[in-house]
Image (cartoon, coloured by chain):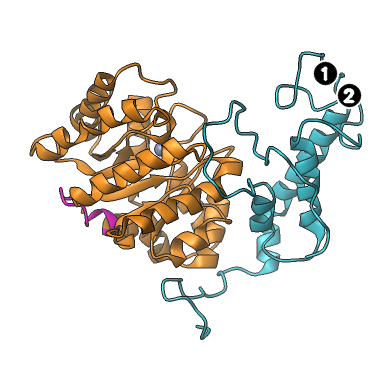
Chain colours: A orange, B cyan
């Protein structure tokens, strides 16, 4: 069954992963800018990273018939130094304003919070404002483990404070049972991340679908350089099939819903 | 849809397409195995050596022998896990959400700076759960 993995860090994955994903039905991926596992030493390192996301990765994916899209930002883990973070933020319009470089850019992401600090919140607010200024979609990372519930509330407050945000153009990612309701109730989209040790499993994501329905929800692997599984979306499809869910429901969560959200992008999501 | 339903909240979905006997046939054994894994993990915690004096909370072994029953271990992880396990058998619904809530930082204000300690998966100052609901 065809699917989109709307949150995966392919720069950290091998070409073999692209091949296996293509065989499992992956037709498109979207790759948010994130932490590389170490703090980058200079803002220039981000310019190189953004070129990797906008130029290199789409070509690598195309070899396997997979459409590649990306999101640009400074991630919350490297946002504790506001001066440094602002230098990175200043690079982003270069990419948004260039018709060639912006072709696969869907929006600003994954912005959000890591340890729920005041500086992280400040940079989050400035990147929300950037997204508004450039009419971009927003992809939000919510914190890990014990920090998630508090961080998700702080993020929803920050989005509301901006005053110009259409919740239908924002996806709050890595929701779990204790955060999904506040996200959906406020009108945002919610992403369920299928991760081995933290976040959700394919089984719990299927439970959330059974509890909250099919609207404004998607699943993703968030595959990266840590323990993660680039084939977790097809594993979710398998879990849903095994429970007897209709093919139309499975397709909605793994293909139609991500398409519907991403088609709102200014730069054009073109996967059919 | 109930009258007090919030405008953005999704409609209550229908019952899932499987019965309890079907679910048990499919998923009972893997979850029996997970229960035994959890029990074996707690037994393993009980067998651990005493921590070296340099090991503080969050850095190493949870405690010397009977780690799961010692009265005042310094690492917050095991007490939080044991409190959360109690929620499995209290016969109230939404166990997953209530366990996640119990394992969440209860504070609401942003921090002045990132904490030095890593995320542990439980609140840093774990308070035992009360048993009433
Ligand atoms: Zn990510």
Q: Which residue is mark 1?
A: B51
Q: Which of these two is toward me, B40 or A88? A: A88
Q: Residue at x 54, y 44 (%)?
A: A199
Does residue A147 appear in the picture of this structure?
A: yes
Q: Are marks 1 and 2 on the same chain?
A: yes
**Point 38% across, 60% down: residue:** A188
Q: Earlier along the polypeptide chain: callout 1 or callout 2? A: 1
Q: Main secondary structure of the magenta part?
A: loop
Q: Of A272 and B81, which appears nearest the observer? A: B81
Q: Is mark 2 within 8 Å of ligand 1?
A: no
| Residue stretch in magenta | A260-269
| Image position, residue A160 (x, y; %) | 37, 59
Q: Are marks 1 and 2 in contact (CB under 8 Å)?
A: yes
Is residue A264 found inside the magenta-colored segment of the image?
yes
Residue A19 appears at what percent x and percent y? 33, 32
Q: Chain of mark 1?
A: B
Quadrant hosting residue A71: top left
How dense is the environment of label 2, judged by Cα within 10 Å: few (below 14), some, or many (20 and up)?
Answer: some
- Of the pair B99 and A86, the residue shown nearer to us: A86
Horizontal placement of B37 versus A125: left or right? right
Residue beneath the point at 68% across and 40% down: B122
Position of B2 with respect to B61 (left or right) is left
Residue A201 visible = no
């Amino acid at each position: 069954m065809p699917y989109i993995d709307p949150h995966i860090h392919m720069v950290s994955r091998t070409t073999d992963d692209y091949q296996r994903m293509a065989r499992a039905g992956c037709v498109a991926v979207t790759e948010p800018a994130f932490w590389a596992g170490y703090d980058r030493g200079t803002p220039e390192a981000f310019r190189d990273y953004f070129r990797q996301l906008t130029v290199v990765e789409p070509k690598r994916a195309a070899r396997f018939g997979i459409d590649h899209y990306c999101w640009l930002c400074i991630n919350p883990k490297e946002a504790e130094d506001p001066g440094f973070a602002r230098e990175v933020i200043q690079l982003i319009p270069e990419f948004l304003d260039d018709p060639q470089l912006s072709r696969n850019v869907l929006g600003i992401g994954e912005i959000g919070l890591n340890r729920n600090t005041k500086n992280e919140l400040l940079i989050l607010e400035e990147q929300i404002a950037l997204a508004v200024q450039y009419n971009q979609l927003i992809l939000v990372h919510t914190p890990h483990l014990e920090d998630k519930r508090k961080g998700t509330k702080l993020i929803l407050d920050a989005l509301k404070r901006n005053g110009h945000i259409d919740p239908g153009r924002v996806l709050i990612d890595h929701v779990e049972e204790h955060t999904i309701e506040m996200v959906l109730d406020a009108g945002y989209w919610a992403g369920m991340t299928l991760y081995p040790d933290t976040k959700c499993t394919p089984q719990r994501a299927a439970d959330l679908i059974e509890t909250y329905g099919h609207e404004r929800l998607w699943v993703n692997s968030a595959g990266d350089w840590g323990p993660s599984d680039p084939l977790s979306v097809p594993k979710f499809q398998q879990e849903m099939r095994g429970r007897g869910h209709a093919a139309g429901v499975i397709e909605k969560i793994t293909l139609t819903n991500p398409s519907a959200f991403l088609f709102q992008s200014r730069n054009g999501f073109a996967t059919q | 849809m109930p009258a007090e339903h919030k405008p953005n909240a999704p409609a209550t979905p229908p019952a899932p397409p499987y019965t309890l006997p079907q679910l048990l046939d499919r998923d009972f054994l893997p979850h029996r195995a997970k229960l035994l894994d959890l029990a074996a993990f707690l037994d393993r915690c009980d067998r651990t050596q005493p921590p070296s004096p340099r090991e503080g909370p969050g850095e190493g072994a949870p405690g010397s022998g009977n780690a799961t029953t010692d009265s005042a271990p310094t690492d917050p992880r095991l007490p939080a896990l044991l409190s959360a396990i109690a929620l499995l058998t209290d016969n109230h619904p939404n166990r997953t959400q209530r366990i996640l809530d119990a394992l969440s930082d209860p504070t609401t204000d942003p921090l002045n700076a990132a904490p030095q300690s890593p995320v542990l998966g439980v609140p840093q100052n774990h308070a035992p759960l009360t048993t009433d609901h």
